Image (cartoon, rainbow, N blue to C red):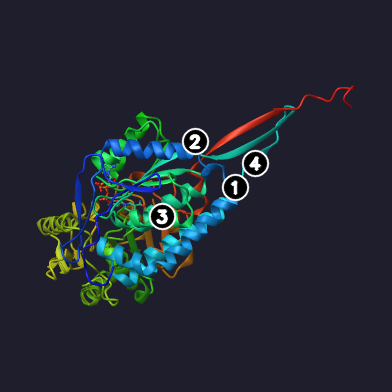
Amino acid sequence: MSEEAQQLPPRQLFVGGAWRDGNAGMRRDVVDPATGGILTTVVEADATDVDVAVRNAREAFDDGPWPRMPARDRARILHRAADLIRERADELVALESHDVGKPVSLCRAVDVETAAQQYEYCAALAQGLDGATRSTPIPSFAYTMRLPVGVVGAITPFNFPLILSSTKIAAALAAGNVVVHKPADDTPLSALFMAELLKDAGVPDGVLNVVTGSGQVVGEALLRHPGVDKIAFTGSTAIGRHAASVAGEHLKPVTMELGGNAAHIVFDDADLDVAIGAVIKAFVFNSGQFCMAGPRLLVARPLHDTVLGILEHAVPTVPIGNPRDPATVIGPMAGERQLKKVEEYIELARKEGGRIVCGGERLDLDGGFYYRPTVIADLPADSRVIAEEVFGPVLTVQPFDDEDEAVALANSTPYGLAAGLQTRDVTRAHRVAARLDAGIVWVNDWAMLDPAVPFGGVKDSGFGREYGPESLEAYTRVKSVVVSLPPVTQEQS
Ligand code: NAP
């Protein structure tokens, strides 16, 4: 695809290693958020399509080569996938940028590179996925085997389509599973691209299937299908709660990567240059549409007005605009639905008595879904804008008087995905990090992630971990084998 927005050929479902139309013949537009124009159409699948995909996956798992292949051979294929991602980076960057509105520079450096690294990391882990021997007091030889769980239903949200699908698929495949993937309705294109890329890398037919369509139909059918052995879900807390309860009814194991609303604490001894850079990155990256964003800024009271003054001038200078411009840092929101939600929250902030320090309005550009990065001060402590997940380029700022109050404010929402703090005091850094209710805590930066570092939430942000060795464990089950070793008889000796 060229740098210009242009129509792509209509896309089909990827099932059993081949492209096919949907059962009901329904299609859905995919919109470029930078222009509001239609990029292409995808299949709006139904439960019959899900059933066909699960049957293909089941067959690939029960009778196909993938789960039986030596881990070293699977790893070789996953390494090839990482190579192909880098070779085809230009195509992937253009596709993801048009589909999601991501600025091309960030998309190349973050989304595409992280996806490649994830395949490499999981390829390495696959080869170390061993069982263990266990000593017992009974005369026996006891050992464990680590086996794949089977058919994984992978459901992902709209904001980081390439990274989030790669995170699930690389880990699931590395452990020998097969996958039926349902990407978000709004941003399904990179998942379809990756299906073809993985086939080119050598992933056998039926091992990865991609079914596009709505959560209420396709997602729901995956949750309930008896042929699906595990659900790997990333998305909002509300849908995650529902998905976990349906999976629970069917006794399917689940991992839940859910919403966030992280606090970012600036202590009075912080290096302000470092802190301001991290604060801005934490709320504008991906137009604020990231689960681990830091939209709640807590500032030591003596610094509160100074920090607000710096933000008022610095935030409007962050380049916002056409995501195809390499200098752009903030692109459009991923869709009109997301833009309207942010507008509603800004309206609410005004009603709650908040003071808009900068932003607070759309950017009218090329018909795209742009919202200016917005800083809000003076909200009441019980503000809904502070408590809820806005999921846009919006930062609320609150003062605190001491460490206890900072920790209490940080832990005051039901979420617990990420948190961060800015301080030059190393003792305080460790002490506060231990007290924050979050799956990951960053000190003096924000959103430092690596495939080796486990990531996931506590409280309403979910359970289970992606990245790190923990991610692969979640796609395995342990079998124990105990071989009786009766005492050696005299005749045998
Ligand atoms: P969402 O509305 O919860 O959707 C997530 C996925 O679930 C989509 O594929 C959606 O399909 C599907 N879905 C909807 N209803 C379903 C149902 N009844 N059964 C099964 N699946 C269903 O989330 P979103 O708005 O796309 O994404 C934003 C949210 O994701 C935020 O809360 C964000 O914090 C969270 N997130 C979390 C992480 C993490 O790692 N913790 C990472 C990224 C995002 P449709 O698209 O067709 O509706």
Quadrant where the C terminus lies?
A: top right
Instruction: Give the amino acid at mark 4.
Output: Ala
User: What is the C-alpha distance between the residues marked 4 and 1?
Assistant: 18 Å
User: What is the C-alpha distance between the residues marked 3 and 1?
Assistant: 22 Å
Residues at discs 2 and 3 in contact (Cβ within 8 Å)? no
Residue plotted at (57% across, 52% down): 73
Q: In front: 366, or 361?
A: 366
Apparent side of residue 213 relative to residue 366 in the rendered image (left or right)? right
Q: Which residue is mark 2?
A: 62
Label 4 SS: loop
Q: In front: 253, or 22?
A: 22
User: What is the C-alpha distance between the residues marked 4 and 3?
Assistant: 29 Å
Residue plotted at (53% across, 42% down): 67
- Comes first in the chain, label 4 or label 1: 1
Instruction: Give the amino acid at mark 2.
Output: Asp
Q: Which residue is mark 3?
A: 166
Instruction: Give the amino acid at mark 3.
Output: Ser
Label 2 SS: helix
- Comes first in the chain, label 2 or label 1: 2
Q: Classify 185 as above or below 420.
A: above
Question: What numbered label is drawn on residue 132?
Answer: 4
Quadrant where the N terminus lies?
A: bottom left
Q: Between tags 4 and 3, which lies in front?
A: 3
Q: Which residue is mark 1?
A: 70
Q: Position of residue 376 (x, y in %)?
A: 19, 64
- Comes first in the chain, label 3 or label 1: 1
Apparent side of residue 242 relative to residue 403 in the rendered image (left or right)? left
Q: Between tags 2 and 3, which lies in front?
A: 2
Q: Between tags 4 and 2, which lies in front?
A: 2
